[in-house]
Image (cartoon, rainbow, N blue to C red):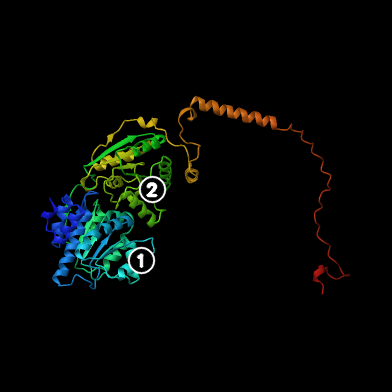
Amino acid sequence: MKFSELPIIPPLQKALERQGFTDATEIQEKVIPAAIHDHDILGTAQTGSGKTLAFVLPILQNLYNQRVAKNLPDGKIKRNIQALILAPTRELAVQIGETLAPYCTNTNMKHTVIFGWVNQFHQVKAIEKWIDILVATPGRLEDLISQWVVKLSYVDILTIDEADRMIEMGAIGDIKKVLKRLPEEKQTLFFSATMPKDIQEMANTLMKTPRKISVAPPATPTKTITQKVFHINRNYKRQLLQQIIKTPGLKTVLVFANTIDETEKIYEFVKAARVSCAVINKKKSQNQRQAALTKLKKKEIKVLVATDLASRGLDVNDLSCVINYEVPTDSETYVHRIGRTARAWKEGLAVTFCTTPEKDRFTAIEKLIGQKVVVDNDDSYKNVVVPQWQSEKLKKINDKTKKPTRGRRQYGKNAIGSKEHSEMRKAERKNKSSAATKGKKPSSPSPSKKPNTKKPSVTNKPKASRSFGNSKTVPKRGRK
């Protein structure tokens, strides 16, 4: 279905044409008409299915119609926060703000985005200039509410995006505090990629009779993603990574790792391979993260290395490939990771490096998504020559994360239990014993024990008491 066939007002239709959107996705076809008619929505959709635009357009249209009904002018007016959008992470909040921007200009709406771990000065100034829509993370919103900066008594539309992620991050307490400050009569748009029991209970407390819209089964990847898996030895991961990122047809690549140290290692390696790249993890500031995302979107860099911070809320047009350098510990995280490519039903590639210890985790992923991932048996990556140069930063990380050699599994001649290894250990023990015997001084005979010439100690005898004639004996200190 095309956007022109949906009941969308002309200002928003012009904005859609300017952005180049003509066809609506399945979630947009079902959500937009119901949300425009003030129905509560409980939506479950795949990552990358376009649900952000599915709730942005109804919010703007309903607020615009309210303003027209009140005959308010299009110029400067006193504004109140009438729509609140909650997002779990800073990256997702910024993405929602970027989606809102081109459509707010056509409807004379103002919005701002607030999130934590940055100075609140500019955020407070933006709120004081009067806004209509507020996009926020729960923690920073609760902070500004306690400071009497944000007032939510005029909110007509509440939207909660990625609710399952909020519960995973432990933000349920802040969400409950925020919900207590909202008016009882409001429209609620509730979206989640998965629908566990905790999410269902929260939705039941917020909405009485919502319209339940499910585009696809929970935790189902988009059909336009081509998935591959390499069952690989961990020592060949760098060769395979270099082969993929230097493929001419891939313009932008997103590489995921499980830990911060591993992302730094991959970043240093890709940089040594002379491929433009950047890294995102918790150690980076918000400005550094945003700068890296902007470079990737503008295709100033080819590779972005990230932890699971970027598994949700990262919207990059025409992202060619997603690489799981490590299998995620949580099966649902895999769906969100590969959902960064093939956005808006475009084609994309997802490649996973699976070592022997990670096979059980990948089997759980295949069980969750309900399909077998194609195994790629191409081993041409073994002939790839990788740079051996290491920066000082990489040396420090390697020293920090170096595992003890004792008990570590090795391969080849140095493998524990091989003949070469046992012979090497025997030679080492012989060398140590010979070196010890050569450097040892001849032992001198032990001197004979001398007889004890000391006089035996005399036991202390009791002191004799003094007597005074026929008087009784009196102790020395007892005299007067």
Query: What residue is disc 2 on?
Result: 278
Q: Is residue 474 visible?
A: no
Residue 197 percent location from the top left of the image: 25, 53
Query: What residue is disc 1 on?
Result: 122
User: Pointers 2 and 1 in contact (CB under 8 A)?
Assistant: no
Residue 292 in the figure: left or right of residue 77: right
Q: Which label was assigned to residue 292?
A: none
Task: Tell which residue pokes out farthest to the right in this image.
Answer: 469
Q: Quadrant of the C terminus?
A: bottom right
Residue 393 percent location from the top left of the image: 48, 46
The one nearer the camera, 117 or 109, is 109
Q: Residue at x 32, y 69 (%)?
A: 145
Q: Quadrant of residue 86?
A: bottom left
The one nearer the camera, 413 or 416, is 413
Residue 425 in the image: above or below residue 182: above
Task: Tell which residue pokes out farthest to the bottom in this image.
Answer: 480
Local secondary structure at mark 2: strand
The one nearer the camera, 78 or 178, is 78
Residue 398 in the figure: left or right of residue 426: left
The one nearer the camera, 395 or 152, is 395
Task: Tell which residue pokes out farthest to the left in this image.
Answer: 5
Residue 282 percent location from the top left of the image: 40, 53
Q: Is residue 281 visible?
A: yes
Residue 29 in the image: above or below residue 429: below
Q: Earlier in the sequence, mark 2 or mark 1?
A: 1
